[in-house]
Image (cartoon, helix red, strand yellow):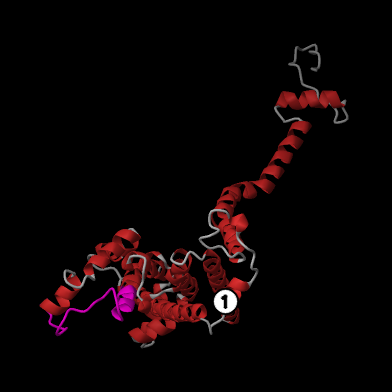
Amino acid sequence: MTRPMGARGSAAVPVRRPMHAAPDVRQHHARAVGAPPKQRSQRQRRRRRIRSKYLPYLLVAPAVVLEIGIHVVPMLVGVWMSLLELTQFHIQDWSTAPFVGIDNYAATVNFHSETGKALLKSFGITVLYTSLSVFLSWLFGLSAAVFMQRPFKGRALLRTLFLTPYALPVYAAVITWGFLFQRDTGLINHVLVDQLGLVDGERPFWLIGENSFWALLIVSVWRTWPFALLCITAGLQNVSTEMYEAAAIDGAGFWRRLSSVTLPSLRPVNQVLLLVLFLWTFNDFNTPYVLFGGSAPPEADLISIHIYNSSFSTWDFGMGSAMSVVLLLFLLLVTAVYLMITNRRRIHA
């Protein structure tokens, strides 16, 4: 509404409506100035609230479905198989396999029987193999990461070469090592015997006998230490150079700076790295299977290969499943204890 023009012809002056106007008038005025209606704003707020509440679950849902289908369901099937006498006579029809309960587990942990003794020996070999492989991989990775911490000419090329074993497909890499370890035509014996003369007499066997353990260890370290290098290099990026400069001013040498600055700063990275390397190496199946052709010698009989042979060589899938479940429980126990110890140390620190 406008005020009528006066005698002097003044322009019309708009008149403000009172705040206590009728509701329909206020809504009409809100539409006129472009403000959203009350119902529309409530609907939008309700949608935003639902989206913020359920969006994380929708994003995680595909990963959860894949995890259940790939890991949880086969694990439950393996637990059920461990409770059956599932041999070659019942493999075609599981419903005919007798239910034996925990008899397979009792035979697995009975270290006075042949089955238990063989499993215990394989477990000891696996513990030794895992300990040496994890320690050497971490040591080589730490050494290379510290060496390449400062920039120098050709550092990028050297990093690329060091990460090559980790980027290669496992089967191609291990098959290549298998050719290198051949007794008569392998490059390793050619260098050690023919070129350097470090071995007198006959050429040593690398894929059978006592040397098979060391051949397997060499391949494992060669494959896993680049991963340690990658993780430790990423962790060193967060270490301030001012700490090294302050330590150098105080007269600290290389080993003192390594023990007082580098290793304490890498403690969170090392905690995760050592756990991952332990789980990978302890469960490693591809490396010994490809290197030895599916039948590892007794000196390199890792527990993964031992469980495989117990299942597919003797066709006793119930016993093999029981061994797998026991191995899973052992790894879960070790992981829980390790996390408790490391978290307690971190809280005290």
Q: Position of residue 147 (x, y in %)?
A: 30, 74
Residue 49, percent from left and from top: 71, 44
Say which element carries label 1.
Answer: helix
Which stretch did the figure color magenta?
195-218
Q: Which residue is mark 1?
A: 107
Observer able to see residue 194:
yes
Q: Is residue 119 above or below residue 90?
A: below
- The quadrant of the picture occupied by the N terminus is top right
**What residue is rendered at 53% in x and 57% in y?**
91
Q: Main secondary structure of the magenta part?
A: loop
Comparing 290 with 310, the one in front is 310
Kind of residue at disc 1: Ala
Question: In terms of image quadrants, where is residue 75?
Answer: bottom right
- Badge 1: residue crowd in 10 Å (few <14, some 14–19, many ≥20): some
* Near-viewer residue (67 or 143): 67
Query: Vertical placement of 334 versus 21: above or below?
Result: below
For residue 177, side relative to residue 39 (left or right): left
Q: Is residue 215 magenta?
A: yes
Q: Is residue 215 left or right of residue 100?
A: left
Residue for point 63% across, 63% down: 98
Name the residue: 73% across, 23% down: 32
Which is more toward the observer, 238 or 251? 238
**Is 265 part of what is drawn in magenta?**
no
What residue is rendered at 16% in x and 69% in y?
Answer: 185
